[in-house]
Amino acid sequence: MKKSRFTEAQIVSILKEYEAGKKTTDICCEHGISVPTFYQWKRKYGGMDNQQLKELL
């Protein structure tokens, strides 16, 4: 499996931008990711904060 360019903490911070009201297309363009990748991350890491992420790992 290919290693991601982003750490889990970075992914969570990107998803927090979405929760704050930023458009999906703007986030994807800014960070250089595809829309399907964003929604995969949202499904996997959605609703997590850094503390929950540490517990997961």
Image (cartoon, helix red, strand yellow):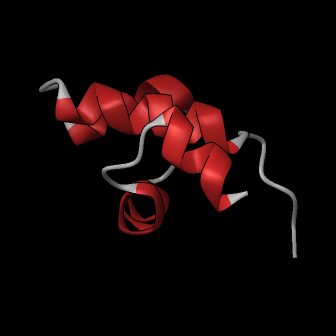
Q: Nearer the viewer, residue 29 or 10?
A: 10
Indicate the quadrant containing the C terminus: top left, top right, bottom left or bottom right. Answer: bottom right
Residue 23 percent location from the top left of the image: 18, 32
For this orientation, the residue located farthest to the left is 21
- Name the residue at 37% across, 68% down: 43
Res 25 quadrant in image: top left
Indicate the quadrant containing the N terminus: top left, top right, bottom left or bottom right. Answer: bottom right
Q: Viewed as shown, does residue 19 lie left or right of 48?
A: left
- Name the residue at 87% across, 67% down: 2
Residue 54 percent location from the top left of the image: 66, 45
Rendered view: 37 above or below 51: below
Q: How many marks?
A: 0
- Name the residue at 71% across, 39% down: 6
Q: Viewed as shown, does residue 55 lie left or right of 21?
A: right
Q: Viewed as shown, does residue 22 lie left or right of 47?
A: left
Q: Nearer the viewer, residue 19 or 56?
A: 56
Rendered view: 14 above or below 35: above
Q: Viewed as shown, does residue 19 lie left or right of 11?
A: left
Residue 21 percent location from the top left of the image: 12, 26
Residue 53 percent location from the top left of the image: 58, 48
Q: Nearer the viewer, residue 11 or 32?
A: 11
Residue 12 makes an appearance in the image: yes
Residue 26 makes an appearance in the image: no
Q: Nearer the viewer, residue 12 or 23?
A: 12
